[in-house]
Image: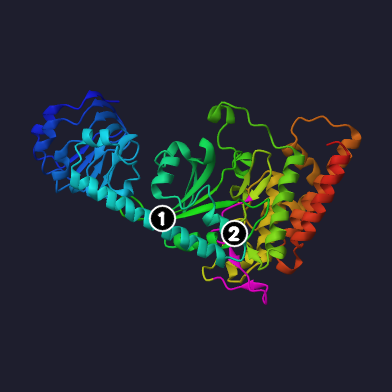
Amino acid sequence: MLSGSIPSSIGGCVRLETINLTGNLFQGSIPSSFRALRGLEVLDLSRNNLSGTLPDFLQEFTSLVTLNLSYNNFQGALSMQGVFGNSTTTLVMGNNELCGGMPEFGLPKCSVESSKKGGLSTVVKIIISVVSCLLGLAALLSFLYFWFLRKKTKDPEAASLFTGNTLLGPTYNNLLHATDGFSSANLLGAGSYGSVYKGIIAIEDNNKMFVAVKVLNLQHSRAVKSFVAECEVLKNIRHRNLVKLLTVCSGIDFQGNDFKALVYDFMVNGSLEEWLHPRLPDEQATGKTKVELSLLQRLNIAIDVGTALDYLHNESGVPVVHCDLKPSNILLDVNMVGHIGDFGLAKFLPQSSPATSSSVGVRGTVGYSAPEYGMGSDVSTSGDVYSYGILLLEMFLGRRPTDETFRDGLNLHNFAAALGDNAADIIGLIVVPGREEDNSSRSSNDHSKKEKQKVGVECSNEVPRERMSISDAATKLAAVRDKLVKAGM
């Protein structure tokens, strides 16, 4: 919260190697006394209210490893000499009045007036003109390359992921701006393979669209494989109950490190996990009251997920196994329609075989992963069915499969099976608390709860061949929903 001008007396500390003043309220320009700080290795003045033109002496600092001037109000033409000629060392995003500079900075071209103001030389202007021509040629070659890819792609809709007008080839800089610098305020969730951020991207006619940006943690040994798997699966399949991949980004960040991200449709109602097990009272977290999911809503979401799995297993051409079905990977749109997301562990199955070898042992998440995976069995569609059964029981019994009460051989499947006809009463207390029902509605409701419990138990059987098929499960749940709707539930 420091404010005012940066003290010029700092320039007297000639042996300084690092100055980090990020995230304050400093105003004015960079003091001219900084000219004496020739030993600086890091100068971070980002996220302040600094203004004015950038001093020429900065380009003479040969020791600088990081120069971060982003998110201020600097103006004028940016030099391409010295440190400003290295886009991996210098960060200038978020300064709307800057222009020129290296093409990697993504700044607009300078007008004649701003060029004079920034002190651009004639040589620099010529360089910019040459670079602009080269960029134009690169853009033409890129267009021809993507056109060639589109011609080679069998599925025109899949090709549009990479050639659509809306999000063609987003850069690291685009996604950095869209997420406000990958701000923690926009963080939607994080896992071992990466983090997901909410972003806003400008599209045609000055409109904007909300997106979810999954940034891969490339320090994880399997992150790249996860990225490739998700791209391969989602570019070949389409279903209303699968999260839509809009585009991908694979390049480098401003420090020269590899950067990979996937951009999806934004699901405004978050994940099913947040609705089943809210971490904080919604009034405290957002100031809004989150309504408890009704029995019919839970049933609709379960059918959405079952229908999507049926498509993946039986109707998508080559069968696809998701391998990580759980509430946090079920996302809900504005109409509370369920969508399966996160295909980082997904596998294509050879059409000649119902299963494929797994080289990583247990696939998925503890509690939801099929027990045969833990014994080295191959990946199969039956494994997804087991996860779906556990998901159903969690939705309608309100308990996680990893609940601490499950020990000594007791698990969610055995617990639900042991409840028998009493399950309806327990489910009623969880999913419709405090609701008054007449006798006819209660009878229909109890029947529906028993049927859902039965489907969940049969899908989560420990023996794969004894599990209900996903198509039968979705059909049975749809029949239960129809009865509920007719009963006016």
Q: Please name the residue that numbered disc 1 is placed on.
A: 139
| Residue 236 position (above or below residue 406) | below
Residue 466: name its quadrant. bottom right
> Dot 2, crowdedness within 10 Å: few (<14), some or many (≥20)?
some
Task: Return the x and y of residue 26 as percentages of the image width and height.
Answer: 26, 26
Task: Return the x and y of residue 200 as percentages of the image width and height.
Answer: 49, 39
Judge depth for marks 2 and 1 and give the one in front: 1
Q: Which residues are magenta?
A: 340-358
Q: Give the distance between the C-alpha atoms of the residues marked 2 and 1, in whole angstroms.
A: 22 Å
Quarter of the C terminus within the rendering = top right
Q: Which mark is residue 230?
A: none
Q: Is residue 392 magenta?
A: no
Residue 365 visible to an observer of this rendering: no
Q: Which mark is residue 158?
A: 2
Helix, strand or loop for disc 2:
helix
Residue 314 visible to an observer of this rendering: yes
The residue positioned 16% from the left and 26% from the top of the image is: 7
The disc labelled 1 sits on which kind of residue? Ala
Task: Return the x and y of residue 248 as percentages of the image width and height.
Answer: 49, 54
Helix, strand or loop for disc 1:
helix
Quarter of the N terminus within the rendering = top left
The residue positioned 68% from the left and 73% from the top of the image is: 354
| Residue 133 position (above or below residue 4) | below
Which sits earlier in the primary sequence, circle 2 or circle 1?
1
Task: Return the x and y of residue 14 as percentages of the image width and height.
Answer: 8, 38
